[in-house]
């Protein structure tokens, strides 16, 4: 917040650690420091801030983040399985600020792309040389009949970085009577973390199996197929045969309406009476992207795949879940890598050099039970302006793997989370 109250001159001068400006073009060397503003301090934005700071200490960097504490979604489904605590998911911005990045704890409310200015809810304005938008997703509450932001206080989505939503769903599952039904409503794609709803249902099933064995969980799905489907189906048959049921779109999974008061969900074929409902609505890029004019009719943001610069507005870059990154999944793994690539792109653009075309890896784990995880890995590269999978470079976990293999993948998931969050927030 302190940075937001400074004048532009102060912001530009502050925290820049100005060194010899050898790589910048002559016209830019006259300036005290170039200012990069980043909106959103999640896996994408915070990773970008760190990478920019590491790449060029002369830059003044302001990270605008609405929340004081970041609640990381990866592995958070373990909370519903009773194997993780919320505290393990939460990180402060203290170390990022201590590293010399200005952290403004406030919400960005408008962007003037012509004036290169961001307005903040505090009333302050920040001018920028380059703006990075990394706001994650907004939930399309109005897409599910009977659901709304107000109803989410009763029927949580637990799908954003709002820790209170995760706590609420956890409390409800713990408080329900044995014999009740937990309904998980899964959205259409594109959406954040494609395997996430199925991982969540698995962890809830693990909890029910061990603590409330007469209870059940049903996934009401707006889709007919999902990522790593056969691996999930096999695991459910083995681990949760009478507890977890998946209703695909064509077997009646599509939710027609939700009645929060009477605790019922009407689908195309059936009515479900639930004890707990976890409703994950369809999604779009965070609102600031619409306000900045960088989201298209799909609700997501088209970008240049090398620099992540908007195809709709100059000097604005979009990374993480909000961006259209072709075949790349909307994952924390991808978001953190995109943050680094975007930083490299910005440094090149500011220096007037051509950014190198990147190759990008992604590896997503899903934990189905304690000590039992599966994963999907891929390598991507830009082809005709969009990220495509590099053929033969990726793959999913084998269908018939021994328990030790699944256990190793669970350890890898844990190690990835610890390493990445330490690199960004530590
Ligand atoms: C249950 C679940 C499990 C998941 N598991 C995995 C996994 O195992 N592996 C994996 O790779 N991915 C996983 N994901 C996906 C991953 O969490 C997201 O892809 C990732 O968080 C995207 O990062 P981001 O930085 O784009 O957005 P976010 O992490 O959502 O961060 C965006 C930040 O921007 C802030 N913000 C938004 N608008 C503004 C504004 N106007 N002003 C100021 N601040 C603003 C928000 O407060 C937020 O902190 C999971 C997701 C869920 C929900």
Image (tube, helix red, strand yellow):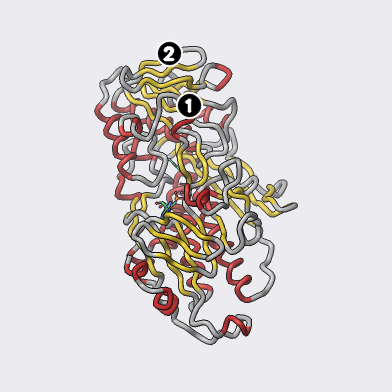
Which structural element holds mark 2? Answer: strand
- Image quarter of residue 102: bottom left
x and y, in percent, of residue 166 in the image = 33, 39
Q: Residue furthest bottom?
A: 20
Q: Which part of the image, by quadrant, shows the N terminus?
A: bottom left
Can residue 422 be spotted in the picture? no
Q: Position of residue 249 (x, y in %)?
A: 56, 22
Q: Decide which of tag 2 and tag 1 comes sooner along the chain.
A: 1
Q: Nearer the viewer, mark 2 or mark 1?
A: 2
Q: Which residue is mark 1?
A: 236
Q: Quadrant of the C terminus?
A: bottom left
Check the image and report above or below for 392 versus 179.
Answer: below
- Does the residue at mark 2 contact the one at mark 1 (Cβ under 8 Å)? no
Image: 361 above or below 372: below
Q: Residue at x 35, y 20 (%)?
A: 274
The residue furthest top is: 270
Q: Residues within 10 Å of mark 2 (few under 14, many from 20)?
A: some
Q: Position of residue 57 (x, y in %)?
A: 48, 77
Q: Which label is found at residue 271? A: 2
Q: Residue at x 33, y 60 (%)?
A: 122
In the picture provided, is 389 more to the left or to the right than 198? right
Say whether residue 157 is left or right of residue 343. Answer: left
Residue 424: x %, y % from top left: 43, 61
Find residue 155 and name its label: none
């Amino acid at each position: 917040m302190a940075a937001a109250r400074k004048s532009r001159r102060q912001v530009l001068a502050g925290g820049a650690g100005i060194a010899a400006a050898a790589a910048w073009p002559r016209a830019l060397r006259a300036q005290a420091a170039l200012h990069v503003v980043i909106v959103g301090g999640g896996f994408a934005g915070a990773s970008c801030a760190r990478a920019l700071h590491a790449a060029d200490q002369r830059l003044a960097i302001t990270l605008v983040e609405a929340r004081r504490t970041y609640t990381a979604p990866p592995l958070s489904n373990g909370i519903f399985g009773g194997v993780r605590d919320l505290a393990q998911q939460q990180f402060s911005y203290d170390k990022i600020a201590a590293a010399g990045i200005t952290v403004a704890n406030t919400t960005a409310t408008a962007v003037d792309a012509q004036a290169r200015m961001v307005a903040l809810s505090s009333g302050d304005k920040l001018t920028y040389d380059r703006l990075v938008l990394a706001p994650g997703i907004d939930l399309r509450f109005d897409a599910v009949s009977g659901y709304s932001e107000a109803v989410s206080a009763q029927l949580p989505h637990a799908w954003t970085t709002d820790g209170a939503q995760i706590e609420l769903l956890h409390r409800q599952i713990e408080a329900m009577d044995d014999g009740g039904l937990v309904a998980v409503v899964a959205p259409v794609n594109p959406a954040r973390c494609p395997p996430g709803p199925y991982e969540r249902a698995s962890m809830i099933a693990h909890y029910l199996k061990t603590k409330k064995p007469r209870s059940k969980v049903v996934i009401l799905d707006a889709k007919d197929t999902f990522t790593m489907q056969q691996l999930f189906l096999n695991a459910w048959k083995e681990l949760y045969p009478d507890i977890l049921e998946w209703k695909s779109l064509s077997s009646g999974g599509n939710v027609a309406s939700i009645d929060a008061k009477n605790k019922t969900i009407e689908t195309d074929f059936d009515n479900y009476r639930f004890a707990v409902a976890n409703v994950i609505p369809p999604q779009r890029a965070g609102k600031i992207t619409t306000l900045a004019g960088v989201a298209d009719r799909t609700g997501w943001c088209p970008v240049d795949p090398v620099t992540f610069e908007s195809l709709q507005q100059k000097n604005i870059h979009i990374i993480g879940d909000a961006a259209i990154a072709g075949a790349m999944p909307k994952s924390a793994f991808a978001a953190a890598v995109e943050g680094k690539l975007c930083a490299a792109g910005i440094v090149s653009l500011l220096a007037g050099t051509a950014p190198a075309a990147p190759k990008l890896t992604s590896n997503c784990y899903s934990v189905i039970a304690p000590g039992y995880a599966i994963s999907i890995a891929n390598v991507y590269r830009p082809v005709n302006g969009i990220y495509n999978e590099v053929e033969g470079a990726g793959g999913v976990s084998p269908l018939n793997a021994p328990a030790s293999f699944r256990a190793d993948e669970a350890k890898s998931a844990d190690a990835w989370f610890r390493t990445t969050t330490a690199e960004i927030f530590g």
